Image (cartoon, rainbow, N blue to C red):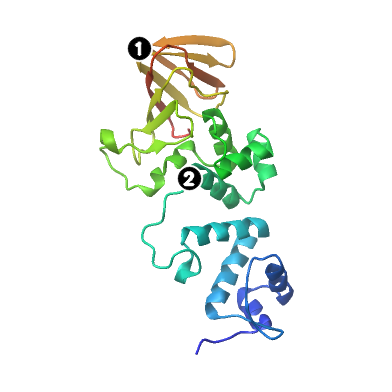
């Protein structure tokens, strides 16, 4: 028979007060079993309470924790079949919006706080997270800085084993939702260099300026691209040309040609 614990006992094991557990229940964060007017907690419930208490101690608010747990339920990643499909196989890949939302929750930021740090509206960020609006490369970079992640994290590289050889058909791809732009990672697990292949249709570009630490080199394989650095320097880079600049300069770019643009783009250190 599964042990049953009263509110006071479960609270003591979780290191919080009974009133805190009642508040968590009122906010929908936990759902203890009930028998009449009494609440009962199982050992598994206590483990979840301890996890919640740990997240609260690290600065996550109740709304953020609730959203994280709901996302785990949908993905089936809660232990012991607590949510989603028990016994499911590999964890499903997250969409770009889901990865951004998870990163925001890890930082304990509200939509308003994160959007302010990234210089965009609350509605814009919410739409990106929900997948109803695309994120520009410039917007992704600003979000990455606000959430203290790297844009390369959104390729899912962290979940792939490090390897020296990345074959042409196995490159991780960043899906921004803009069909004019395809960004492929040319390395998995590199420590200092961050090489990407950009394939861009006419008119595609960063849709805004961004900057970060480091230095970068852009070698154009096909087509031509217009670069602006700090809104002062303008460079038209054509096939065979190579542009190098400090990443701290605000930079934006656009495929200004009539055909496809192909660029080999290398950042160092890994800050993009």
**In the depicted view, which residue is nearer to us: 164 or 253?**
253
- Residue at 64% across / 66% down in the picture? 29
Residue 39, placed above or below residue 168 = below
* Disc 2 crowd, CA 10 A, few/some/many (<14, 14-19, 20+): some
Q: Is residue 19 above or below residue 239?
A: below
Residue annotated with mark 1: 239
Q: Is residue 261 above or below residue 136?
A: above
Side of 255 where 59 appears, left or right: right
- Using a 10 Å C-alpha cutoff, classify the residue at mark 1 as few (fewer than 14 neighbours), some (14 to 19) or many (20 or more): some
Residue 130 placement: quadrant: top right
Q: Tell me how far mark 1 sits from mark 2, CA to CA.
A: 33 Å
Q: Position of residue 1 (x, y in %)?
A: 50, 90
Q: Earlier in the sequence, mark 1 or mark 2?
A: 2
Task: Where is residue 3? Give x, y as percent.
Answer: 54, 87
Residue toward you, 62 or 27:
27
Report the residue that reaches farthest toward the bottom: 1
Between residues 98 and 114, which one lies in front from this camera angle? 98
Q: Are marks 1 and 2 in contact (CB under 8 Å)?
A: no
Q: Is residue 140 visible?
A: yes
Q: From the viewer's perspective, is residue 40 above or below residue 52?
A: below
Q: What residue do we see at 49% from left, 65% from top?
A: 78
- The quadrant in which residue 263 appears is top left
* Residue 95 disc label: 2
Place of residue 186 in the rendered image (x, y in percent of width and height, measured from the top left): 33, 33
Secondary structure type for disc 2: loop
User: Can residue 61 be seen at all in this image of the molecule?
Assistant: no
Quarter of the image holding residue 90? bottom left
Element assignment for label 1: loop
Q: Disc 1 or disc 2, which is closer to the eye?
A: 2
Count of residue discs: 2
**Tag of residue 17:** none
Residue 231: image location, x then y, percent: 59, 14
């Amino acid at each position: 028979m599964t042990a049953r614990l009263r509110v006071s006992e479960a609270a003591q094991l979780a290191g919080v007060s009974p009133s805190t557990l009642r508040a968590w229940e009122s906010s929908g964060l936990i759902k203890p079993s009930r028998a009449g007017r009494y609440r009962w907690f199982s050992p598994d419930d206590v483990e979840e309470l301890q996890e919640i208490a740990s997240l609260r101690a690290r600065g996550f608010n109740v709304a953020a924790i609730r959203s994280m747990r709901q996302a785990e339920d949908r993905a089936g990643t809660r232990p012991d079949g607590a949510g989603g499909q028990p016994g499911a196989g590999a964890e499903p890949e997250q969409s770009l919006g889901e990865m951004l939302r998870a990163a925001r929750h890890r930082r304990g930021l509200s939509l308003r706080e994160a959007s302010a740090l990234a210089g965009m509206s609350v509605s814009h960020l919410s739409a990106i997270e929900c997948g109803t609006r695309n994120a520009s490369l410039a917007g992704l970079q600003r979000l990455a800085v606000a959430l203290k992640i790297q844009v390369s994290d959104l390729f899912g590289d962290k979940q792939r084993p490090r390897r020296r050889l990345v074959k042409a058909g196995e490159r991780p791809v960043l899906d921004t939702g803009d069909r004019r732009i395809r960004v492929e990672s040319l390395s998995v697990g590199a420590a200092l260099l961050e090489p990407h292949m950009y394939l861009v249709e006419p008119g595609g570009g960063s849709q805004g300026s961004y900057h970060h630490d480091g230095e970068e080199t852009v070698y154009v394989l096909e087509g031509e691209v217009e670069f602006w650095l700090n809104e002062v320097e303008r460079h038209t880079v054509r096939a065979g040309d190579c542009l190098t600049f400090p990443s701290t300069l605000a930079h934006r770019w656009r495929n200004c040609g009539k055909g496809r643009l192909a660029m080999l783009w290398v950042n160092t250190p890994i800050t993009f």
